[in-house]
Image (tube, rainbow, N blue to C red):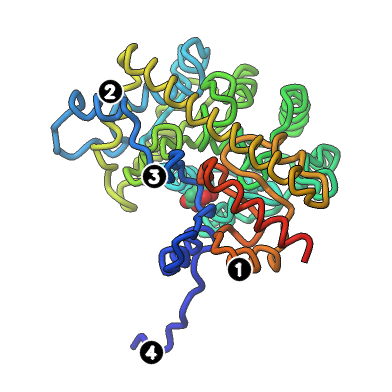
């Protein structure tokens, strides 16, 4: 009965790892998936996680449908700020979800059922999974201009024009910081203009916050965009992931918050979120969330975490400089200053898919076909190999 099933293509990002794993070359390098690696090219388990593991709960009972209460409260505080008026006024409902993807999907399912406008605008380009998440939840996906290939920066005029002509009430997906895949973020001043435009048109912001602390190294600075929208008293949604900033990739820990106008509405929204979650996966896993809650509520562990987070962000920034310097030293044609200007885990190199294929075939360097490089996978030892490959790709 399944004979007719056709083979689906590999995922554009996770499929890169599948191909990398099959390559026997000793010099192979995986710069595809956004996963942090040490200078030695190894995955990093933060030291603070090891402490938190000892202290976190050993309870293995079911969590409530909305997840661990402490985790939810602390996650809202982390993204909206400890002094957020929305939290003080109990206007926020937060539910623990399966990392960023799960949070986006639960939010999307809720919107498809309870929000009057079914259209969501996502930036062009964006993380490949966004289109699938929102489409499968029943929303209609449209794009707004974001990246300008000529400047390798933000197409701010295009963004304002596209959001300006979006139908009133449309949902807008915004990357809170460290835009994936481009590494290009609006300035605070531009965020303010985006906020004014969106509020004047009644557009609903849905933030994807997968890199808080990873862009600038500061948890507060990386949440500024979200906090601006919350400060004006309007509604918004925010999906948080702890995959990158706590290195909890495989634990699938995240949260969805919905900021409402009143506490009463927030309570009703939460009751409906439970109806989305229960038939989907019943209730979320306890292990990762109790580790996160342990860290967020203990001042010493929290401080230790911010130090380790900053060290990861700084190492990535130093990789940007080293790669830029290596290309300059080789006299590689073109302007590569975007490597140091872009922020977060990724550099959107501007390399095309043929150049990427060449680099994979000849140099065993694995990256997504859109030319995105995970800077977090690079080290001082591998920079020269990558620079050689880029140089050969653009000069051949
Ligand atoms: C990425 O963009 O590499 C990460 O967000 C991992 C993923 O799930 O795609």
Q: Which mark is residue 14?
A: none
* Disc ID at residue 294: 2
Residue 76 image position (x, y, % from top left): 44, 24
Q: Which residue is mark 3?
A: 42
Tell which circle, 3 or 2, labels the residue nearer the N-terminal end.
3
Name above or below for residue 136 compared with residue 307: below
**Quick one: quadrant of the N terminus?**
bottom left
In this view of the protein, which residue sits in the foreground, 325 or 86?
325
x and y, in percent, of residue 351 in the image: 72, 57
Left/right of residue 246 with respect to residue 158 in the rendered view: left
Disc 2 residue lies near ligand 1 with CB under 8 A: no
User: Depth check: 43 or 206 in front?
Assistant: 43
Asked if residue 190 is positioned above or below residue 342 in the image, the reply reads above
How many C-alpha atoms fall within 10 Å of the one at disc 4: few (<14), some, or many (≥20)?
few
Q: Is residue 108 visible?
A: no
Q: CA distance from mark 3 to mark 2?
A: 25 Å
Residue at x 77% of width, y 47% of height? 145
* Local secondary structure at mark 4: loop
Foreground of the two, 177 or 203: 177
Q: Real-space Cα distance between discs 4 and 1?
A: 37 Å
**Front residue of 359 and 16:** 359
Looking at the rendered structure, which numbered label has been put on residue 362? Answer: 1
Give the label on residue 3, or none. 4
């Amino acid at each position: 009965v399944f004979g007719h099933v056709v083979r689906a293509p590999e995922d554009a990002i996770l499929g890169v790892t599948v191909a990398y794993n099959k390559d026997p070359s000793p010099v192979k390098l995986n710069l595809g998936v956004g996963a942090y690696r040490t200078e030695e090219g190894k995955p990093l388990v933060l030291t603070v996680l090891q402490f938190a593991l000892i202290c976190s709960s050993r309870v293995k009972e079911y969590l409530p449908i909305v997840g661990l209460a402490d985790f939810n409260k602390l996650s809202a505080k982390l993204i909206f700020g400890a002094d957020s008026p929305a939290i003080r006024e109990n206007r926020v409902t937060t539910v623990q979800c399966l990392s960023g993807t799960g949070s986006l999907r639960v939010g999307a399912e809720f919107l498809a059922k309870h929000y009057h406008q079914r259209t969501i605008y996502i930036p062009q380009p964006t993380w490949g999974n966004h289109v699938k998440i929102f489409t499968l939840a029943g929303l209609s996906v449209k794009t707004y201009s974001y990246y300008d290939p000529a400047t390798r920066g933000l197409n701010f005029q295009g963004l304002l024009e596209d959001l300006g002509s979006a139908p009133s009430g449309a949902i807008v997906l915004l990357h809170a910081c460290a835009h994936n895949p481009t590494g290009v973020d609006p300035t605070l001043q531009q965020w303010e203009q985006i906020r004014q435009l969106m509020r004047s048109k009644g557009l609903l912001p849905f933030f994807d916050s997968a890199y808080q602390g990873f862009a600038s190294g500061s948890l507060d600075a990386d949440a500024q965009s979200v906090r601006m929208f919350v400060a004006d008293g309007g509604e918004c949604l925010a999906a948080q992931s702890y995959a990158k900033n706590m290195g909890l990739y495989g634990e699938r820990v995240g949260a969805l918050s919905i900021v409402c106008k009143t506490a009463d509405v927030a309570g009703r929204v939460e009751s409906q979120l439970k109806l989305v979650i229960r038939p989907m996966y019943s209730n979320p896993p306890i292990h990762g969330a109790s580790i996160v809650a342990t860290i967020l509520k203990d001042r010493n562990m929290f401080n230790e975490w911010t130090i380790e987070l900053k060290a990861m962000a700084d190492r990535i920034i130093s990789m940007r400089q080293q790669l830029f310097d290596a290309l300059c030293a080789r006299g590689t044609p073109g302007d590569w200053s975007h490597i140091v200007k872009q922020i977060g885990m990724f550099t959107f190199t501007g390399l095309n898919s043929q150049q990427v294929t060449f680099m994979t075939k000849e140099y065993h360097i694995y990256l997504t076909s859109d030319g995105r490089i995970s800077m977090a996978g690079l080290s001082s030892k591998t920079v020269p190999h990558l620079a050689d490959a880029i140089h050969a790709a653009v000069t051949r």
